[in-house]
Image (spheres, helix red, strand yellow):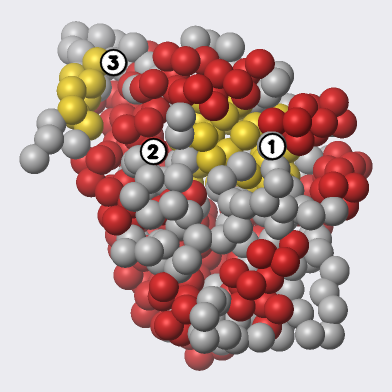
Amino acid sequence: MDSTSADRAVRPEDLRCLADTERAAAAVLPAAVRDFVAGGSGAEVTLDANRTALDRVFVVPRVLRDVSGCTTGTTLLGRPARLPLALAPVAYQRLVHPEGELAAARAARAAGVPFTVSTLSSAPVEALTALGGDVWFQLYWLRDTERSLDLVRRAEDAGATAVVLTVDVPWMGRRLRDVRNRFALPDHVRAAHLEEGPSAAHRAPSGRASALAAHTAAVFSPALTWSSVEALREHTRLPLVLKGILAAEDAVRAVECGVDAVVVSNHGGRQLDGALPSVDALPDVVTGVAGRCEVLMDSGIRCGTDVLRALALGASGVLVGRPALWGLAAGGEGGVRRVLDLLADEFRDALGLAGCPDAAAARELRTVRRDG
């Protein structure tokens, strides 16, 4: 975001819901960057279905319960969090604001929720853990296995508190908005955890695929398997999370490999178009793991009621991606803090109105799915 756009950024207090934040971000971002953040793969069927599926989940509230002391606090991966929520790993955040991940991580620390730093972060993990918050490190499995394990060691040494292995990206989904825009990274944005040659693929526009898709195809391994997960489990002492699970069978296998949590996710509709909406996959995964690991969910979370829905369906918490990026674009650290404040206010409101004194009680609520 350039200085002219920054001058037009709205005041955080003027943002009343996450949709306001998205509109504010759209007004200041270049069209190609806005499309990079907002877009999905293919015809964006799954992208749209994530939101539709969440809106079909109705919660059956309980009444005559004392909610005068309603609290949103919980634990995630054994550590306290003020909300059942973490910021999801999102690449190249300096695309939308000069401070990028640093501003978002400070906002997460202030809100008392984990911040997940991406392998494709535009700020290094050491700079983010130095801020003092709870930082999870997201890993894309690279073609060079030792390089992948070195990144995990680097994150551990920096003070990260968990490793989140993304398992649904053997290569990047075909994102037509980026292809049409011939999207490539500007010179001031780089992947802080990956070495960059003088002719880096992510800076070379192509007519067949986005530059980022070409770059990730060159460095990500399509040979990630359960044996890789087992090797990673043996390699790190940190809690291990697998992100990108939709099949209950895969969640069960993850438990057998010793993971501490799975994230039910279709990558926000950015990988396989036509994949099941995350919220529709969630109940079977929860049943499959049977309490043997935590279950988180992402893809489509846009308000505090969505967090309540996820918990009522058995999740321990949710990951939030695009809304934080919209907040970052609209107002830097203050914009991300506003997004998290809105989610906290909305979630507390939803808890109390559903008759739940705390987040744990939300997992006892009954839900009804209404189609059409």
Q: Is residue 245 above or below residue 47?
A: above
SS under mark 2: helix
Report, in whole angstroms, how far the alpha carbon at label 1 lies from the one at label 2. Answer: 22 Å
Picture disc at residue 225: 1
Quadrant showing the N terminus: bottom right
Residue under circle 2?
278
Q: Nearer the viewer, residue 197 or 94?
A: 197
Q: Nearer the viewer, residue 72 or 219?
A: 219
> First in sequence: mark 1 or mark 3?
1
Q: Amino acid at mark 3?
A: Leu
Say whether marks 1 and 2 touch (CB < 8 Å): no
The picture places residue 173, in percent across and down from the top left corner, at 50, 60
The structure residue drawn at horizontal position 85% and vertical position 26%, both measured from the top left corner, is 234
The structure residue drawn at horizontal position 62% and vertical position 34%, both measured from the top left corner, is 242
Say whether marks 1 and 3 touch (CB < 8 Å): no
The picture places residue 112, in percent across and down from the top left corner, at 60, 38
Quadrant showing the C terminus: top left
The picture places residue 258, in percent across and down from the top left corner, at 71, 19
Q: Amino acid at mark 1?
A: Thr
Q: Amino acid at mark 2?
A: Ser
The structure residue drawn at horizontal position 84% and vertical position 79%, both measured from the top left corner, is 197
